[in-house]
Each structure stands twice: as structure tokens, then as C-alpha cells.
Image (cartoon, helix red, strand yellow):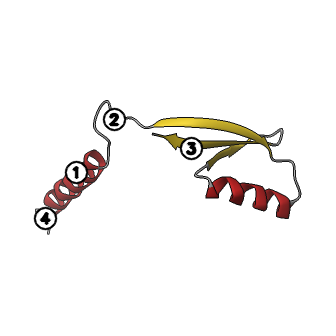
């Protein structure tokens, strides 16, 4: 059993490397993003409605800051 352990670790390392490198975009093919900031100091239902409306237009929530600003991004073509 002790001789199988290095083989397992090598196999796991190979699989992890393959998945990691195959999942990366080719160099020079970095996506371009458009960003926007909106007021997120709303009651829960209104905030959910606001975020859903932006999501329907292709925007993704990046972060809500401590001062109540929602940062959103959308991939540009």
C-alpha cells in the first residue's frame, strides 16, 4: 500500500493541473467588463427587485460596499 500513495498523489496533481490549465482562457482573450454602481440602501424586497432587474439585463453583482453601494459588472463584446 505504501507504493501506491505516491502514484495517487501524482495522479491527483496531474488531474488538478489539467483541470486548472484547461479552464484558463488563452492569452490575449481576457474578457472586457463594463462596471456600474447603484444605491443599494433599499428595503430587502426593493433591493431584490433592483438586483433582479439588473441581472435580467446581463449585470452580475460584484460587491455591496459598507456605505450601501452595489458594484455590478457586465461582459462587453
Q: Which residue is mark 3?
A: 74
Q: Looking at the image, tell me whether mark 4 or mark 3 is earlier in sequence order.
A: 4
What residue lies at 56% left-to-right and 44% top-to-bottom? 74
In-image side of 3 versus 20 (left or right): left
Q: Position of residue 58 (x, y in %)?
A: 58, 52
Residue, disc 2: 29
> Left or right: 29 with respect to 47?
left
Which quadrant does the C terminus fall into?
top left
Question: What residue occupies the far bottom of the structure in this picture?
Answer: 1
Disc 2 crowd, CA 10 A, few/some/many (<14, 14-19, 20+): few
Question: Distance from label 1 to label 2 (Cα)?
Answer: 19 Å
Distance, label 1 to label 4, CA atoms, is 21 Å
Disc number placed over residue 18 in the picture, else none: 1
Q: Nearer the viewer, mark 1 or mark 2?
A: 2
Most foreground residue, 61 or 11: 61
Badge 1 element: helix
Of marks 1 and 3, which one's residue comes earlier in the chain?
Answer: 1
Secondary structure of the residue carrying tag 2 is loop
Q: Which residue is mark 4?
A: 4
Image location of residue 40, percent across then percent down: 81, 47
Sequence-first disc among 1 and 4: 4
Q: Nearer the viewer, residue 58 or 64?
A: 58
Q: CA distance from mark 2 to mark 3?
A: 16 Å
Amino acid at each position: 500500500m505504501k507504493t501506491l500513495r505516491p502514484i495517487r498523489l501524482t495522479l491527483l496533481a496531474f488531474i488538478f493541473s489539467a483541470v486548472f490549465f484547461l479552464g484558463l482562457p488563452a492569452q490575449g482573450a481576457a474578457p472586457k467588463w463594463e462596471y456600474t454602481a447603484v444605491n443599494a440602501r433599499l428595503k430587502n424586497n426593493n433591493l431584490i427587485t433592483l438586483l433582479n432587474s439588473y441581472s435580467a439585463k446581463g449585470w452580475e453583482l460584484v460587491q455591496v460596499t459598507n456605505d450601501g453601494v452595489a458594484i455590478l459588472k457586465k461582459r462587453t463584446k
